[in-house]
Image: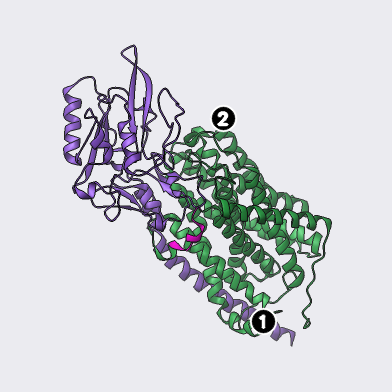
């Protein structure tokens, strides 16, 4: 199935944060006064008002200190844990790929935050009625924040000045990623997002290990919803057998205890 | 008996509990009006804290005495346990009501709490938990109606009695499902929850522990009620109940060890550090020692029974806390300790439940001897 992907080539990123700004502007997200963390990262993490940030990290490469930058946001999993965890269908996967949040259905239980293997969903802790916040992939077919639905690129991709982010079909992006890796020895031989958590629509390639940015690299390749399904699929047969067994036990032992009572009465008389 | 008389003795201890419960109510209103950020220390790293960890996950487990006793008394008709049936059921009902309040306070869009009843996210474990816990709470309230209508709204007594068998069967089926599903919530934490606790079998472990903590809670509760309300249950009855729990704990212990071995996680047990130590505390003090007590001569005495009860219940509390906090610590990092308001709400809720128990026990036929209350 076709699925819209973004390929992020971290070797091209200069850390300009134009994507971060474009995201705030397009989505009407309030900005705050900068307090830098981890070199020039600001804010230090995505939050209730920030869908994406560019991590600035100093790391070592070939015996030299180098600066590298990584844009992080929702990876838009092919089989998203958050969607499987939401008990009110407030998070849904669209056929085009984006995982979209429907705030009117949200109860605010925050199970999606715990379920996400990448720690993506954030919460508006300062609000009286807080909602979940995460990248919507500029996909909002019935609302005013739509771009991808109109055939445009996401705001961040559109803004990127040096081709760090490219947007297209997932298959093509994967092909491009491996072509670049195989054509240049500087790349780490790993497309982050190709297999993680069953695959994601955001794909990363880099010339320094992904751990440098705090990316989790020990994530299972099996889609997370499958783990839950292997347990939940037992629910209907379990209800049927255990319910049946309880009913049988109820009437059988009741009869037995009634008979025992009658017997003891007879003896009494 | 016919005259409706209500009584509630006020003692200094009860006054303190009433004050704590009132404080919790005040903070709860403040929280609903101003949000979670103003009242709790929850954050993006730790979205679930004391209220979910203790009030909900632990609360539901400790209320397991309701369904384990119901299974023994009402489904299997082991009549010698009749004397504890009503008090166990009352504790369970109050426990679940407390859980519902805790949940309600914890969700961000509390006016939207009913949403999953119509918007079915059925592939979520939480969906099963939500349905089962709400239905079961409702069923328990109706079951309690059978007792309440002995005194008030008497015309409802007969109809309620007529549907009791259905309620009783559902009242064991539903908790079996959601007790396991509360563990099932953590299956998706694969790779995040420490291997000492994460397991595909965690639902089974949650279910079994909620079952064997039942007799432990009943033992504690009848001993306290014996002191406060003059309710005496013979040691021999409690002992056979404790031994049922003990047998289940032996299976539980064996399964957990086999499970660790299967996942090659046995090495973590003695690896030292926070996780290993907490795991050992949970298993030794909360499972192994209680098993020894249950099958030793000491369990013939009240002190042995109470020690069993306190250790087993503490073991289950530690287990749930380990899953919610200790086991997640490596993945989520430091950054959460409950605020004073979170503590105050938790403590106040428990005090409120204890007061409700005392009031109901003193005004309805909970502790007295009663016949099997089922339609002939």
Residue B114 x %, y %: 47, 63
Q: Nearer the viewer, residue B77 or A44?
A: A44
Residue B295 shows in this picture:
no
Query: Label 2, on which residue?
Result: B273
Which one of the lettered chains is coloured green? B
To which residue does mark 1 refer? Answer: B153
A177 left or right of A192? left
- The magenta segment: B108-115
Q: Nearer the viewer, mark 1 or mark 2?
A: 1
The residue located at (31%, 42%) in the rendering is A26
User: Crowding near pointer 1: few (<14 within 10 Å), some, many (20+)?
Assistant: few
Mark toward the start of the polypeptide (1 vs 2): 1
Chain identifier, colour purple? A
Depth order, front residue of B272/B301: B272
Q: Where in the figure is residue B202, as x and y percent of width and height?
A: 48, 49
> Residue B246, relative to residue B145: is it above or below?
above
């Amino acid at each position: 199935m076709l699925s819209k992907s973004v390929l992020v080539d971290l070797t091209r990123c200069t850390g300009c944060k134009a994507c971060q700004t474009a995201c705030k502007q397009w989505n009407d997200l309030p900005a705050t006064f900068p307090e830098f963390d981890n070199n020039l990262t600001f804010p230090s993490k995505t939050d209730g008002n920030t869908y994406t940030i560019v991590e600035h990290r100093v790391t070592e490469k070939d015996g030299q200190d180098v600066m590298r930058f990584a844009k992080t946001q929702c990876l838009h999993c092919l089989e998203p844990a958050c969607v499987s965890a939401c008990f009110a269908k407030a998070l849904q996967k669209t056929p085009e790929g984006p995982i979209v949040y429907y705030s009117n259905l949200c109860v605010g239980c925050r199970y999606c935050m715990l379920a996400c293997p990448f720690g993506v969903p954030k919460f508006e802790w300062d609000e009286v009625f807080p909602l979940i916040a995460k990248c919507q992939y500029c996909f909002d077919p019935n609302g005013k924040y739509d771009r991808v639905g109109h055939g445009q690129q996401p705001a961040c991709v559109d803004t990127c000045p040096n081709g760090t982010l490219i947007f297209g079909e997932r298959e093509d992006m994967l092909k491009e990623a491996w072509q670049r890796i195989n054509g240049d020895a500087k790349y780490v031989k790993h497309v982050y997002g190709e297999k993680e958590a069953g695959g994601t629509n955001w794909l990363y390639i880099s010339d320094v290990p992904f751990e440098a940015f705090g990316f989790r690299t020990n994530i299972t390749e099996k889609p997370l919803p499958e783990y839950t399904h292997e347990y939940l699929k037992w629910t209907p047969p379990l209800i049927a057998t255990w319910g049946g067994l309880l009913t049988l036990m109820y009437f059988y032992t009741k009869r037995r205890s009634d008979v025992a009572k009658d017997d003891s009465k007879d003896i009494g008389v | 008996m016919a005259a409706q008389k209500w009584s509630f003795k006020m003692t200094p201890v009860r006054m303190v509990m009433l004050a704590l419960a009132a404080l919790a109510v005040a903070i709860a209103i403040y929280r609903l009006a101003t949000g979670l950020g103003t009242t709790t220390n929850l954050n993006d790293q730790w979205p679930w804290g004391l209220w979910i960890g203790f009030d909900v996950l632990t609360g539901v487990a400790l209320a397991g005495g309701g369904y384990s006793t119901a299974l023994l008394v009402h489904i299997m008709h082991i009549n010698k346990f009749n004397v504890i049936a009503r008090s166990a059921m009352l504790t369970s009902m109050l426990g679940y009501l407390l859980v519902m309040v805790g949940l309600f306070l914890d969700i961000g869009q509390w006016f939207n709490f009913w949403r999953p009843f119509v918007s079915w996210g059925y592939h979520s474990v939480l969906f099963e938990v939500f349905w089962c816990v709400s239905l079961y709470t409702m069923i328990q309230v109706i079951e309690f109606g059978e007792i309440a209508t002995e005194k008030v709204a008497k015309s409802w007594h007969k109809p309620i009695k007529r549907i009791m068998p259905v309620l009783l069967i559902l009242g064991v089926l539903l908790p079996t499902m959601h007790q396991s599903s509360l563990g099932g919530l953590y299956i998706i934490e694969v790779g995040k929850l420490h291997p000492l606790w994460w397991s595909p079998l965690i639902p089974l472990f949650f279910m079994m522990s909620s079952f064997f903590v039942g007799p432990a809670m009943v033992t504690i509760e009848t001993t306290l009620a014996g002191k406060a309300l003059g309710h005496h249950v013979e040691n021999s009855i409690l002992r056979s109940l404790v031994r049922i729990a003990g047998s289940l704990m032996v299976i539980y212990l064996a399964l957990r060890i086999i499970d660790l071995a299967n996942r090659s996680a046995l090495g973590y047990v003695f690896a030292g550090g926070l996780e290993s130590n907490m795991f050992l505390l949970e298993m030794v003090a909360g499972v192994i020692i209680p098993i020894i007590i249950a099958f030793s001569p000491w369990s013939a005495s009240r002190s042995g029974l109470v020690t069993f009860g306190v250790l087993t219940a503490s073991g289950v509390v530690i287990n749930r806390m380990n899953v919610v906090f200790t086991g997640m610590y490596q993945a989520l990092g430091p950054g959460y300790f409950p605020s004073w308001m979170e503590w105050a709400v938790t403590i106040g809720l428990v005090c409120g439940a204890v007061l409700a128990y005392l009031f109901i026990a003193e005004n309805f036929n909970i502790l007295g001897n009663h016949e099997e209350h089922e339609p002939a």
